[in-house]
């Protein structure tokens, strides 16, 4: 088990602190996005009492002009977000408007707020990555543990399909899923990516389980009569899950990039940073659209990579005990 000295190093390094702040910032923005930007009031009080239009019925106001939305809530006590428009709202500023307080990055060629589009792109990327990563861990950890610990026929039975899934490029799997399920489902896309990533997790865990099972302290515990369940729980699993846990930040970054690539190719989800990058190919689109998306994507990639390196160092630090 990794000693506390390696983990304390994580909190002291400035690179980790900066990476943590950037990641935490994007996550908080994605979760509480309606407080900052939404095409409808965050809170409204009508004849039927209080309700949350921006949360409960965002699609109802997604493409409605802000002036029309305000008129719909004129007779209600309404609290609007900081930027009262969504990613598909045609704003009153008009196409290609310059930066202002109402539109910090200006508007695109269709009069949509670029800054709000970047914020909603973070929700698309991080929600998809989180779901896919959770599925990969839920599938990969038990499969890798069973294959590595039971060995023999079980290893062959589980490892061969995992090798086959791992050999298929994830972009190809995503393309097949998008053809089979073209309804812009985050769950379907997350399931496809999570299945491929589960093979990577299982391979990592299996290798660590096999290596740990041959360590002297495990062999000694088995010779003293420890049952297999105790060996797994006390000695093998705590070390076997280390590579999977250490790879979480890197896995998050890779899925975010994968989602952007698929959206750039026209196979991703609407509102993605990749879709904004693809708009850079359109001469009528202002350069701020792909530039803002590339900056947001780069910040997530760099922060995840920095965090991965420090966590990996902490995992490799000498442990004080098993």
Image (tube, helix red, strand yellow):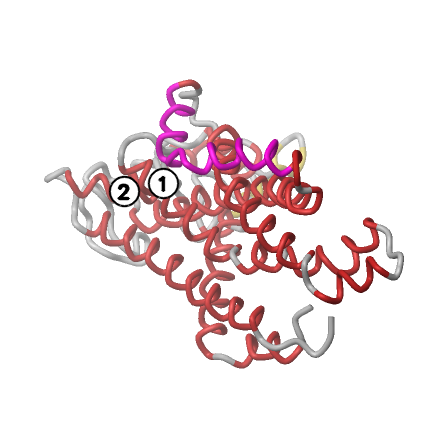
Frontmost residue, 251 versus 39: 251
Q: In this view, does 90 lie to the left or right of 73?
A: left
Residue bearing the label numbered 2: 276
Which quadrant holds residue 320?
bottom right
* Residue in the image at 29% along x and 38% along y: 275
Identity of the residue furthest to the right in this view:
225
**Neighbour tally class for label 1: few under 14, some 14-19, many 20 plus, Cα within 10 Å:** many
> How many numbered tags mark residues here?
2
Residue at x-position 47% and y-position 51% = 252
Quarter occupied by the C terminus: bottom right
Tell me, for residue 161, which label it has, or none: none
Magenta span of residues? 155-179
Give above or below for 210 relative to 308.
Answer: above
The picture places residue 39, in percent across and down from the top left corner, at: 43, 39
Identify the element where label 1 is drawn: loop
Q: Distance between the residues labelled 1 and 2?
A: 7 Å
State the image coordinates of residue 228 (x, y, percent, origin top left).
81, 49
Query: Where the N terminus falls, by quadrant?
Result: bottom right
Left or right: residue 97 compared with residue 31: left
| 226, 189: nearer the viewer | 226
Circles 1 and 2 in contact, beta carbons < 8 Å: yes
Determine whether 34 is above or below 193 in the image: below
- The majority secondary structure of the magenta stretch comes to helix
| Front in this rendered view, residue 191 or 317 | 317
Picture coordinates of residue 285, whole percent (x, y): 16, 41
Residue that numbered label 1 is attached to = 272
- Residue at the left extreme? 283
The reply to whether the magenta stretch includes residue 211 is no
């Amino acid at each position: 088990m990794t000693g506390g000295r390696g983990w304390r190093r994580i909190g002291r390094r400035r690179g980790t602190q900066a990476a943590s702040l950037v990641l935490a910032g994007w996550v908080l923005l994605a979760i509480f996005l309606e407080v900052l930007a939404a095409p409808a009031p965050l809170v409204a009080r009508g004849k039927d009492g209080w309700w949350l239009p921006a949360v409960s019925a965002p699609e109802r106001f997604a493409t409605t002009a802000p002036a029309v939305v305000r008129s719909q809530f004129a007779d209600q006590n309404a609290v609007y977000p900081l930027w009262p428009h969504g990613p598909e709202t045609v704003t009153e500023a008009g196409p290609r408007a310059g930066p202002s307080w109402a539109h910090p990055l200006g508007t695109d060629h269709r009069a949509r707020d670029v800054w709000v589009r970047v914020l909603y792109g973070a929700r698309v990327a991080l929600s998809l990555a989180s779901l896919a990563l959770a599925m990969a861990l839920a599938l990969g950890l038990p499969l890798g543990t069973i294959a590595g610990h039971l060995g023999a026929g079980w290893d062959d039975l589980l490892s061969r399909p995992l090798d086959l899934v791992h050999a298929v490029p994830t972009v190809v799997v995503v393309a097949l899923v998008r053809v089979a399920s073209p309804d812009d489902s985050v769950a379907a896309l997350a399931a496809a990516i999570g299945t491929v990533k589960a093979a990577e997790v299982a391979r990592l865990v299996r290798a660590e389980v096999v290596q740990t099972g041959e360590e002297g302290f495990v062999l000694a515990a088995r010779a003293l009569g420890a049952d297999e369940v105790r060996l797994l729980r006390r000695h093998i699993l705590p070390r076997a899950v280390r590579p999977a846990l250490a790879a979480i930040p890197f896995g998050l970054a890779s899925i975010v990039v994968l989602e952007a690539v698929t959206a750039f190719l026209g196979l991703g989800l609407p509102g993605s940073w990749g879709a904004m990058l693809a708009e850079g190919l359109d001469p009528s689109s202002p350069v701020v659209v792909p530039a803002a998306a590339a900056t947001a994507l780069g910040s997530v990639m760099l922060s995840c990579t920095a965090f991965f390196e420090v966590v990996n160092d902490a995992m490799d630090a000498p442990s004080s005990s098993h």
